[in-house]
Amino acid sequence: MFRWMSRSKNGSANGLHVESDYLIDLRNIEKAYETEAGPFLALQGIDLQVKPGEFVAVVGKSGSGKSTLINMITGIDRPTEGEVIVRNTPIHTLSEGNMAVWRGKNMGIVFQFFQLLPTLTVVENIMLPMDFCNMYTPGERYDRAIELLQMVEMEEQAHKLPSAVSGGQQQRAAIARALANDPPIIVADEPTGNLDSYTADNVFAMFEKLVYEEDKTILMVTHDTDLANRVGRKLTISDGEILTDEQLREAQPA
Amino acid sequence: MKFKPRWIKVLRDLMFNKSRTALVVISIAVGVTAIGMVMGAQSVINEDLPRDFFAINPASAIVFTLTTFDDDAVQAIRDLPEVEEAQGRRTIVVPFRTPNGNWRNMQLYALPDFEDIRINQLKPQEGAWPPEEGEILIERSAFVPNLGFDGIDIGDSVTIKAPNGKEKTLRIVGTAHDLNQFPPQLAQSAFGYISFDTLDLLAEPREFNQLEFIVAENKLDEDHVKVVSDLVQDELEARGVSVVFVLAFPPGEPPFQSFIAGISTLLVVMGFLSLGLSGFLIINTLAAILTQQVRQIGIMKAVGGRTHQLVWMYFGMVVVFGLLAVIIAIPLGALGAGGLAGILGFFFNFDVRGFAINPQVVVVQVLISLLVPLLAAIYPIIRGTRTTVREAISDHSMGKGQFGTRPIDLFIVGLRRVIPGIKRPEQISLRNTFRRKGRLILTLMTLSLASVIFISILSIRASLQQTLDEALGYFDFDVQIRFSRPYRAERLTREGLGFDEVSEAEVWGFGGGRRVRPDGSESDNIIIQAPPADSVMIEPVMLEGRWIEPNDTNAIVINNDVLRNEDDLTVGSRVTLSINGRDSDWVVVGIARSSFPQPAIYTNAEYFSRATNLVGRGQAVLLKTTPETDLSQFSSIIETHYRDRGFRVEETQTVDQARSILTLFFNIPILFMLAMAVVLGIVGGLGLMGTMSINVIERLREIGVMRAIGASNWSVLWIVLLEGMVIGFLSWLIGGVVALPLSRVLTEQAGQLLLQSSPSYIFSVPGTIGWLVIVILLAVVASFLPARSASKVTVREVLSYE
Ligand SMILES: Nc1ncnc2c1ncn2[C@@H]1O[C@H](COP(=O)(O)OP(=O)(O)OP(=O)(O)O)[C@@H](O)[C@H]1O
Ligand SMILES: [Mg+2]
């Protein structure tokens, strides 16, 4: 029912290529932060493989390292040790600039707060990633943005500034923006964290639709145990380690 | 065409933050306007003044004579192969009665034929031309109320006192423009033009006492003009004409060209300084904008924006700032240039015509309003856009204005113990001041620079005034009357002492001579003053050697301006002077400090009168008056008295007059510099305003917290205002410390430029204190808006912020 205009090319932007059987392949990740009390290990020896079409929830106590882990996958942060291979690209080796390009095309990111640029309308916010990554022709971008907004049921708000729409609506717009360049992977850090349970449910439904109807692969950090139990796979993090890795449902075949 | 979203963001950011945009735009516009104004004025001056000047067919030199000469003499000069054209005039100084009954002096020029003025042409302005018998034309810029023509119109009559003492009434039939004259506004004296028939009416002979000529070849060669001047002078002297001096002008240059050029150089320097300050403002504001946008930068990067794309976005924003600024700055600069040129035209009596927006100036303005902001933006933009996504979205490592880590912070905290009674809000202000150190430094640089310049300019002014007072101080007389020929000294003093107001009178010899150098060449004419050796009217400041003593014979004292061209002279040098065409030998016994920037030789009156065959006679009388005398009134009374007794008065001057003329002369550049200092002050104030509003925006959260715990409107307002004042005070302090040595250097430069000599130096303490008051006021004004918006912050707003 959605007419995706073009699938993004394989993401190995600069010829770097590492064979992996997985879409996301974290090998023996360690992350140390320098603190005044000496190095602090936020992640220790993480191995994680994700196949296409999986819907993964990451749960754990505050400070357990969820965001740190997620940031490894998006390339927002780099591991101190280990390898991060996403779509056969060792992203931990990319330069900051190449990383931005790669991320723009391969990964949609949804944060908890402060998602949209305050001086752009909702639809302009959604066009921004296409603009930056030079995806689609300038003429196509607007139509595509409107279609994405229709998908998240936000077309009515397309021409409003972010300050004029509700938090849940902003979050849905952010999801639409994450899809702008049609990335295969969506990563969300507490996307429902500051939404009421009804709205959170709504946003979550959106994610389910993406996984089950659009073949996206999603990693989502959440504190909401109800939601966490509705996904395909639940990772529990504690003190920088994966405590449990539960398969709740079968992944959709890619 | 539709804009890409990223450019829409740039434009919206500009529109949604109107006051911030306005602040940056104004900051740039101030500097660019200053440049446009100065360059525009310069181009007007460089075109209009020379054009007007060359249109009058300017003389190469003017010979002033003591005795008169006739057409034959003029023709003889004209016939010299080295001379292209020559022409005679007669000039006399006459008093005229102003509408309020006072007498003022007017320099009268009598021309033989107004339809055939060949050199230093007079241009008709309003009214009739030429003046018939009994009629007079007045120089146009002298025909103003402040020079004695209040309420007088063309067609009215003016009463003058002829050299023979008789009052005559002349009808003012029109005005004329005499660009060759010392500008009346500067001379503070009037010029009038009459025909030779009118000269008859005044019982004056139809003869000349001034000869103007133009050399035939090498018109722009100063040395050649001098050589020809000597020939002309020799020719006149051979015909029995006594030459006082020859005035040669820098060839090919309008009068005051170098003076005006000096002013405009100063202005250009000021223009660039304000541009530099604009640069600092831009750096500051952009750094703040980027700090505020850290999260947005992070989001843009997270959705695929690359650093270089963001860099271009922000540079694009800067370009828009520059374009907006130049839109304001072009018309404002042109307007200012017109005004500036107009002021100069008024003072220097030339027409500012055909003023329009100058394309060259516009090109420069556009270039600098784009380039300067872009240059200023490089650092903040590169730094701001380097933020990584992680830095932008995490609360770790934000480092927003940390306080408490540097030694200076501990010092500030420690101040609490030193300054007793300092209260909590004041402590907060002090600490806030030092939180964003980079921003503080830039703001301080801007304001301090304004301080330095302001204090320096006032010091220059005070120093020049001081120099002038010193110079005039060693003229210990009140009125000096010079005559156009020598009279018996005893008669001159007797007439003067006949007045109760006169306590002492002295007669001085007066003349001109040229030095004959060992290689046979001759110097310019140098004024010779011959006071009695025991004169009580002069207290020279000796730089070397001694002053004239009673039994001195051929001893001379030279002033330091003589040394400018005759640098081989020292105490003990033997000098040959050519006086009235006769050579005589003299010995330098001392070097005195110049009073006016003009070479002068002093010698014993007694010996001088013998050497010039004028024993017992003198050409100037100097009078000391009793303290309660009203000098301006008395000087015209006594001048009239001498005239009535048949003395031919050439010029009467009071020391006050001399002071006010000279003061006016250097007050013009000072005025311009002060105007620029005000501009710099405004730029500095804008900078402070920017800094304060950024600080307030950045601290909204903590202001909200302060409110939540009960801070009143007033205490929030006061905390911000005080922070502004602390910055103002610091800039004053820094500015003062820098100005202390710098103003000395600048004073020296200004002295060389305006007085051609080293001035005395004083540091202007009143100026420094005055600037403190100004800068604190400025700080209050600049911080007020940000402070008020801070005091309006509600707790709720802060919580919803971001
Ligand atoms: N830049 C940093 N410097 C030092 N320590 C850090 C830094 N970033 C994170 N940490 C630490 O690493 C640990 C993991 O942080 P992380 O943000 O991943 O936790 P989290 O599981 O996402 O918690 P929350 O649920 O509160 O978001 C925490 O103890 C945190 O204090
Ligand atoms: Mg987290």
Image (spheres, coloured by chain):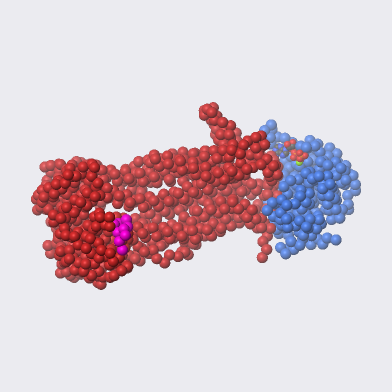
Ligand 1 location (quadrant): top right
Residue B683 falls left or right of residue B162: right
Instruction: Identify the residue at horizontal 44%, vertical 44% (top origin).
Output: B452
Can residue B186 be seen in the rendering of this structure?
yes
Can residue B58 be seen in the rendering of this structure?
no
In the rendered structure, does residue B347 fall within the stretch colored magenta?
no
Instruction: Identify the residue at horizontal 67%, vertical 61% (top origin).
Output: B3
- Which quadrant of the rendered structure holds the N terminus of chain B? bottom right
Which residue is most to the front?
Answer: B100
**Residue A157, placed above or below residue A62:** below
Residue B633 in the image, given as x and y percentages of width and height: 24, 50
Chain in red in the render:
B
Residue A100 falls left or right of residue B580: right
In this structure image, what is the colour of chain A?
Answer: blue
Instruction: Identify the residue at horizontal 68%, vertical 35% (top origin).
Output: A35
Pick the front one: B599 or B224: B599
Residue B413 in the image, given as x and y percentages of width and height: 56, 31
Residue A201 in the image, given as x and y percentages of width and height: 84, 47
Residue B446 in the image, given as x and y percentages of width and height: 50, 46
Residue B39 falls left or right of residue A84: left
Residue B141 falls left or right of residue B435: left
Q: Quadrant of residue B796?
A: top right
Instruction: Identify the residue at horizontal 53%, vertical 60% (top origin).
Output: B327
Q: Which residues are magenta?
A: B145-153
